[in-house]
Amino acid sequence: MNLKLILASLLFAITFNLNAQSDKLVGKWKYKDVHEKEKIDAQGLQMLEMFFGEMTLYFDSKGNHKVFMMGKIEEGKYNLSDDGKTIQLLSNKGAGEEIELVEISDKELIIKMGSGDGAMILERVAVEEADKQVETPKKIQKQTATKQQIAGKWLLDAKKTAEKLTSTQREMFGELMDGSYFEFCENGKYKANILGAKAKGKWELGADNSTVIVHVDNSTKVWSILNVDDDNLGLLQGDAGKKYYFTR
């Protein structure tokens, strides 16, 4: 058989399988049980039940998702990785999460969240009308930027960031956030000090150069660029989060 034909056939097969897996994911899934629970001690099982016992995940065919967990709903976009092994979630507030897809069938979904050993079994349940009502964030005016414009150490401008709070809240905010900063190194490394807690990771510009994507440990945050010049930087967490302002 012609080599080009073989490669084309393999590519078609891979694409077909990924599309089928993506189609299977669409729908609503509810926590059912812990996968391979014999590997987890009693305390660990109790913790998993407490955190995830009422959890549901909803994925639609347009790339939107909803997560209900511990009484709260998070909405945003999702994407299935090229190898079909990871579900990438990005909330409207800019928080990112990667879920390992262990196994999927028409009736059950097995996933692993975070770096722990526990995986969860979810069962497919009926989709309700409320699930289909996806929140659409208001469009914001973003500014594109180069890596050189973003690179550097930025000190949080607590006064401007808290300008819509009351005077008492502004004072408290200023004391709490004193000394907080983001540092975007030219080599792609990221450092931060927020509320005295230090963090290290990596950063990059988004595909359209209007977002800054920060990776720390297993978490990802996306910041929309509101404004940037030689001395000032304005960031919005996601498309519906809080605005933060910085100075050099």
Image: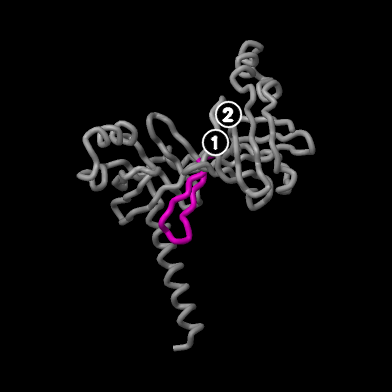
Residue at the spot x=63%, y=44% of the render? Answer: 212
Residue at point 49% right, 46% down? 64
Of 126 and 29, nearer the camera is: 29
Is label 2 in contact with label 1 (beta carbons under 8 Å)? Answer: yes
When asked about the image quadrant of residue 223, the answer is top right
Identify the image quadrant of residue 197: top right
Q: Which residues are magenta?
A: 76-92
Q: In the rendered structure, which amino acid carries the disc numbered 1? A: Ala
At x 75% / y 33%, what residue is drawn?
Answer: 232
Instruction: Please give the residue where the numbered disc 2 appears in the rendered image.
Output: 194
Rendered-image quadrant of the N terminus: bottom left
Left or right: 124, with 237 as reference point: left
Left or right: residue 96 versus residue 143 is left
Q: Earlier in the sequence, mark 2 or mark 1?
A: 2
Q: Is residue 123 above or below residue 198?
A: below
Q: Which residue is mark 1?
A: 199
Residue 85 is situated, as x and y percent measured from the top left of the image, at: 41, 56
